[in-house]
């Protein structure tokens, strides 16, 4: 039997803009077919079909229940507002539909657990729709990160230079330098052997109260691994006023749930899905008048690995999709990890063994650009993989692959911790360690 025989039948619940991309991906995947689309009104479903040039064979429904009762629908893709996920995901699972859920998966992990339990009890595959995991570039990056000779071990030491198994960090912050230092000091128990705050005008200030001027921060902590990720874009006035992602009754997590999901997911992917010891948001959060997060920063710390990760997510900054990972022997950097610049070819830079030579201006090696080609765009790869898993359950009696549920759950746990930190005066949240029950 070939892959495209008896394809998995998909239904789309909700005609959000991202559903256009996924409907095309279903069409491109060799083992999937679009059976039906549902909206809250038949008029919206028809508009979606015309706009996306769907086949006349695709059934259109004016209610979600009608689609979920269709026996030809094996799996549903659900790009509904986050506040509606738990209701319709549980209903879909009870009706035997495998679930591909748009991110963020839930408003908190309790809601996600309710959905995961519904899928597990009905032997259904769960996956969130983070497409970048499925690009072959992601697998290639992981291959290099696991190469101890080229990249190094997570317990190795990274820095602007390597010295005494400690890391010298220097950077500029506005108001947030204090918060980041306090977090790292409390999270790591670091010996801050070199610390100063310097105003641009040259006046030195003692560590203590926050200041509004830009300051230069320099301190030393023991650390083995550094990760940074950012996901941001500059929303238009219409977006910032009307998009569901800035509405407290629809997507109350705002930029943290939308853009931050990618950053947290990328950091945890780098750390093989291990929860950090400590999480703390930094005091830079921007909210709209309804209290929804438009921009925020956070830092994560792993005590055993002595690893620090930071991320920035925003609806009010220039577009970024960066991931940078630094080890003892190498560094990896990708500028478009969420959505590649090109569909059929993606790149990232990797450097191993770089150093200054006698303090000359220049490096002994330059970053190597790694190219990875793919026949399907990453969303098509996601649909293909999800359909493969569903087909194994449906036709071969295999068990659902719990890897994807676990990936979503650890991401949600860290997201919840960041939100908890923001809501509680940016206090550090301990997630894992000997002091926890």
Image (cartoon, rainbow, N blue to C red):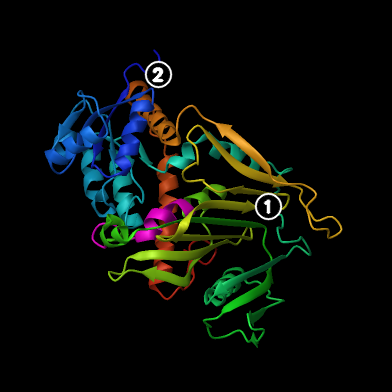
Whether residue 96 is situated above or below residue 429 in the rendered picture: above
Give residue 261's position: percent from left, percent from top: 42, 53
Residue 249 magenta-highlighted: yes
Q: Nearer the viewer, residue 225 or 287?
A: 287
Quarter of the picture holding the N terminus: top left
Q: Above or below — where is 225 with respect to 387?
A: below
Q: Earlier in the sequence, mark 1 or mark 2?
A: 2
The 10 Å Cα crowd at callout 2, few under 14, some 14 to 19, many 20 or more, is: some
Q: Would you say residue 63 is visible in this rendering?
A: no
Q: Position of residue 415 (x, y in %)?
A: 42, 58
Depth order, front residue of 275/100: 100
Instruction: Measure the C-alpha gap from mark 1 to mark 2.
Output: 40 Å
Q: Position of residue 49 (x, y in %)?
A: 22, 33
User: Where does label 2 land, which residue?
Assistant: 3
Instruction: Check residue 20 for magenta coloring.
Output: no
Question: Hey, which quadrant is residue 116 in on the image?
Answer: top left
Q: Secondary structure at mark 2?
A: loop
> Where does label 1 land, which residue?
327
Kindly state the secondary structure of the residue where label 1 is placed.
Answer: loop
Report whether residue 200 is seen.
yes
* Mark 1 closeness class: few <14, some 14–19, many ≥20 residues within 10 Å: many
Q: Residue furthest top?
A: 1
Q: Main secondary structure of the magenta part?
A: helix
Can you name the residue that lies furthest to the right here? 358
Q: Which mark is residue 363?
A: none
| Residue 103 higher or lower than 47, as above or below | below
The picture places residue 131, in percent across and down from the top left corner, at: 43, 40
Viewer-side residue, 50 vs 331: 50
Q: Which residues are magenta?
A: 248-263
Q: Is there a contact, CB below 8 Å, between mark 1 and mark 2?
A: no
Quarter of the image holding residue 416?
Answer: bottom left
Name the quadrant containing residue 401: top left
């Amino acid at each position: 039997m070939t892959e495209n025989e008896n394809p998995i039948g998909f239904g789309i619940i909700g005609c959000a803009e991202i559903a256009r991309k996924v409907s095309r991906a279903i069409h491109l995947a060799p083992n999937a077919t679009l059976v039906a689309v549902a909206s809250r009104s038949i008029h919206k479903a028809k508009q979606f079909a015309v706009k996306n040039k769907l086949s006349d064979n695709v059934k259109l429904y004016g209610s979600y229940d009608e689609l979920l009762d269709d026996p030809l629908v094996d799996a549903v893709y659900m790009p509904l507002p986050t506040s509606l996920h738990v209701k319709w995901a549980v209903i879909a699972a009870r009706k035997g539909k495998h679930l591909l859920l748009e991110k963020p998966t839930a408003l908190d992990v309790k809601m996600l657990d309710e959905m995961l339990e519904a899928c597990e009890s009905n032997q259904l595959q769960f996956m969130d729709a983070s497409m970048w995991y499925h690009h072959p570039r992601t697998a290639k990056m992981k291959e290099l990160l696991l190469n101890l000779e080229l990249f190094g071990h997570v317990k190795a030491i990274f820095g602007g230079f390597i010295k005494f198994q400690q890391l010298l960090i220097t950077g500029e912050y506005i108001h947030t330098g204090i918060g980041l230092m306090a977090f790292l000091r409390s999270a790591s128990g670091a010996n801050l052997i070199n610390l100063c705050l310097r105003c641009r005008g040259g006046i030195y200030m003692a560590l203590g109260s926050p200041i509004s001027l830009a300051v230069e921060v320099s301190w030393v902590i023991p650390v083995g691994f550094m990760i940074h990720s950012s996901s941001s874009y500059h929303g238009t006035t219409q977006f910032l006023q009307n998009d569901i992602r800035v509405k407290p009754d629809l997507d109350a997590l705002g930029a943290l749930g939308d853009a931050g999901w990618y950053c947290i997911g990328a950091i945890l992917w780098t750390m093989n899905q291990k929860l950090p010891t400590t999480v703390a948001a930094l005091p830079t959060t921007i909210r709209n008048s309804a209290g929804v997060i438009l921009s925020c920063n956070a830092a994560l710390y792993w005590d055993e690995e002595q690893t620090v990760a930071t991320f920035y997510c925003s609806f009010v900054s220039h577009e970024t999709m960066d991931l940078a990972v630094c080890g003892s022997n190498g560094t990896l950097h990708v500028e478009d990890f969420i959505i590649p610049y090109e569909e059929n070819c993606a790149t990232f830079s990797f450097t191993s063994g770089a150093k200054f030579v006698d303090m000359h201006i220049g490096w002994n090696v330059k970053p190597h650009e790694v190219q990875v080609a793919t026949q399907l765009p990453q969303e098509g790869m996601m649909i293909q993989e999800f359909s493969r898993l569903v087909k194994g359950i449906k036709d071969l009696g295999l068990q659902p692959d719990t890897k994807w549920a676990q990936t979503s759950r650890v991401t949600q746990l860290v997201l919840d911790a960041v939100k908890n930190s923001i809501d509680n005066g940016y206090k550090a949240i301990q997630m894992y360690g000997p002091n926890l029950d």
